[in-house]
Amino acid sequence: MEKRTKILATLGPASDTVQIIEGLIKAGANMFRLNFSHGSHEYHLNTLENIRLAMRNLNTSVAILQDISGPKVRVGELKEPFDLKKGDILTFLKDEIIGYKEDEKKYVVSINYPELLEKVKLNEYIYLYDGIIRAKVIETGDEIKAKIENYGTLSSRKGVNFPNTVIDIDVITKKDKEDISWGVKNKVDYFAISFVQNETDIVHARELLGDYKGKLIAKIEKFDAVENIDKIIEVSDGLMVARGDLGIEVPYYEVPTIQKSLIKKANAACKPVITATQMLLSMTENERATRAEISDVANAVLDGTDVVMLSEESAIGDNPVNVVDTMSNIISKTEEIYHFDKQDKLKYQDKFDVIQSAVTKLADDLNAKGILALTSSGKSAMKISRYRPKTPIYTFTHKKKVLNSLCAIWGVNPISIIKESQASRMFQKMLVELHERGLLNKEGPYVATVGYPVGMPGSTNTIKILTESEIEYYLSLSFKKKV
């Protein structure tokens, strides 16, 4: 089944072999996530090499996203798990200690970022263990005391969230710098930056890339990131709606509306957006998804997301290929009622935007069999995607790196690299590539767009309609040369 919304699958012990990766691609995966919260550089390099081997075996392109772990705040080691109950007092010390039970209903812990305790104010909340345990601050100073408001068991190294506190720390840790350096060396396509607070965090991450043209995805999982979203979008190459920590940082009932708002803003800015966290979580162990999960995926698609993401489901689940196949089927069926044709609903980003808008409207009005877009930087293909045409978008580039990165863009089918400089040769090569891949409908028409001078980013300025007779002409030229 054809789909336009892309699938990002996290790789892990259940899915890191060439055979499984090929199965995931065939089932509909367009991108793969390397989660640097787990695993060594050696492990991830082996997985990366397996991805690239699978790409060569299948003669296809996929994008690779390196998820940088960031400064995850956690409690320290505990002597034993704490069975916390409503009314218990949890004391946070600034010194590193082994957590212990001080007295009946009194417990003492430390955290790995003790400087954050100086920023906490009276009556603010602290959440522990992925938001399961809620505590209200009742005393500040050298020690922070918080009263537990619900039941939960706390064990060593569980996460801590401060949803009311602007923590203002460097989100790029020493480990992250080493991991980003690894990503640059091994030429991943996207870097997902965790716990972004404002645009400065993305600017800092960009500096660490040096001359490397990797793309930065800002993970929106903190309340202050939501408040600073417009400036974050300006300096990033895309967004991830990371609903796990976000659902702790903001009131849970705001997550759906924030998701819709972030997707809408990313669409308007022509930046890809990934919707993530627990989309088909039950399929980690079960063969079928729940009705609620199916609806969650469908609603993200209808919201306009470019990509939907799988985490545990594909990394450690019982049947990763079945999960991707399920998600692919949900997307394809949902897109039957998709809100296409946004030419009149979006403002032009620049004076050349009219070209991409015209291409999409022309292709849809002609009931074209495809849009053929030759792009140097990938920007023109992204702009065509922004208008959400019904017509399939087949993209050709001058650089393999650009081709892979376009796997994250809604509706874009990256095909191949073209080095030609003459217009007739470019059109010919595009048609031949589609024909050889079994994607060409010789009856046409196709709407093609290229730019002059060739290879200059932002120069797309030519639209050509390729009719049935022209398609036959270009194909006959090619096959005569082969003979």
Image: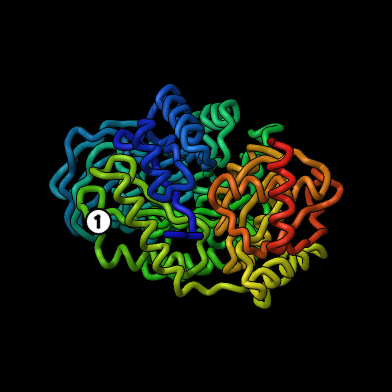
Q: Residue furthest bottom?
A: 344
Q: Residue at x 80, y 49 (%)?
A: 424
Residue 254 position, x and y percent, is: 42, 69
Estimate how packed mark 1 is, as few (under 14), some (14 to 19) or many (20 or more) residues with alpha carbons within 10 Å. Answer: many
Q: Residue at x 80, y 62 (%)?
A: 352
Q: Nearer the viewer, residue 58 or 46?
A: 58
Residue 53 position, x and y percent, is: 47, 29
| Image-based side of 337 in relation to 80, left or right | right
Query: Looking at the image, can residue 220 be seen?
Result: no
Point out the image quarter for the C terminus. Answer: top right
Q: Nearer the viewer, residue 154 or 317?
A: 317
Point out the image quarter for the N terminus. Answer: bottom left
Q: Residue at x 41, y 62 (%)?
A: 331
The tally of labels here is 1
Q: Residue at x 71, y 32 (%)?
A: 211
Whether residue 449 is situated above or below residue 400 in the rendered picture: below
In the rendered image, which quarter is residue 107 located in?
top left
Query: Looking at the image, can residue 132 be seen?
Result: yes
The residue identified by callout 1 is 148
| Image-based side of 353 in relation to 130, left or right | right
Residue 473 position, x and y percent, is: 74, 53
Inspect the image, locate mark 1, and give the three-letter code of the amino acid beneath it.
Ile
Residue 480 position, x and y percent, is: 72, 41
Q: Nearer the viewer, residue 427 or 163?
A: 427
| Image-based side of 33 in relation to 466, left or right | left
